[in-house]
Amino acid sequence: METEYAAALRDYLAGSGEEATLRAYELGRKAITDGVGLIELAAVHGKAVAAALRAAGTAEEKARLAAVAADFMAEALSPFEMAQRGFIEVNRTLADLNQTLTHKNADLDSANKELAALSRIKSQFLANMSHELRTPLNAIIGFSEMLQREAFGPLQPKQHRYVDNILSSGRHLLTLINDVLDLSKVEAGKMELRLGRVAVRDLLRETATVMKGMADRKEISLDAEETSESLCVTGDVIRLKQVIFNLLSNAIKFTPAGGSVRLRAAAGQGFAVISVEDTGVGIASEDQQRIFDEFQQLASGDSREFQGTGLGLALTQRLVELHGGQITVASEVGKGSTFTFTVPLAAEQSLAA
């Protein structure tokens, strides 16, 4: 750099005109490319000027050369000035973008707060409405059960059929209301789990026994595989039963007569792995994720064959996640589905694992 700069300065001092001026500018650009700073470039310039002045004769000649050399230096520094202006412009642009992002973040924060407030209002509304609806509905179900037992006198066959329909519809509506209430509690963060040590074998036996009647009515075999007596989890036994009831109910509902449903469990790494397997209609791959969304069902309108609320799996997923587990589905259309969820092992088993 020093040799090239000194030669260019000598040509400039000799009056080479535009070509020497252009060389000064190119030397400035080369300095930037090579990482040579202003102080280093000034030192190179100083050495080159000193050498030129030593070769000069009179004091007047030296003064003229010094002034011309200053012009050469200004030309060499012009790329640095342009780069500095570019940096200033970039910094100004970045400052404007940062300010815009700050405003956007403030808007997003405000929108998130509004959404959170709306979610709380929605959850509170659903909870209040569910409570208000359950009270008269329980009365309807209770009186329907009394009529069904002919507590007020014998009924004609047609009256029996009407009472059965009222009772069935009332129970279905109560299930919907209970699901909405539970879901609103989970979303509002008000669902509290009563955690304790739960024996998985008892959990599977009890839920299978309760659901066996529903399976028998559809001529479906329901089997709960034998599980080790020592396999225990940490969870809320009522909510875990609710999860399995939901999965078994769906499995039975979507399995045709002559099919089978199997309930099984095994110990995993820190978790118990519980699965419900059926030989039902199956779920298309594109539907397997959205079935866990609220109010989602595989068919809608008049074509929907199976009655449901569209809340069961959404609530099931929330309950499993509240326990610190996960739920997944593996399915093939026409061959059946397997829903699998995990629950943390009890403390002593987790340590052993």
Image (spheres, grey):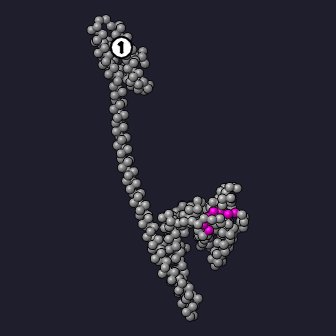
Establish if 154 lies above or below 14: below
Establish if 194 lies above or below 85: below
Q: Where is residue 115 in the image (x, y as percent from the top left)?
A: 41, 60
- Viewer-closest of 69 and 232: 232
Establish if 3 lies above or below 173: above
Left or right for 28, reference 333:
left
**Residue placed at 36% from the left, 41% from the top?**
95
Q: Residues within 10 Å of mark 1 (few under 14, many from 20)?
A: many
Q: Where is residue 94 in the image (x, y as percent from the top left)?
A: 37, 40
Q: Does the magenta stretch include residue 234?
A: yes
On the image, numbered disc 1 is attached to which residue?
49
Q: Does the magenta stretch include residue 114?
A: no
The reply to whether residue 275 is in sight is no
The reply to whether residue 129 is in sight is yes
**Part of the protein shown in magenta:** 231-237
**Residue placed at 55% from the left, 73% from the top?**
306
Q: Is mark 1 on a helix, strand or loop?
A: helix
Q: Position of residue 93 (x, y in %)?
A: 35, 40
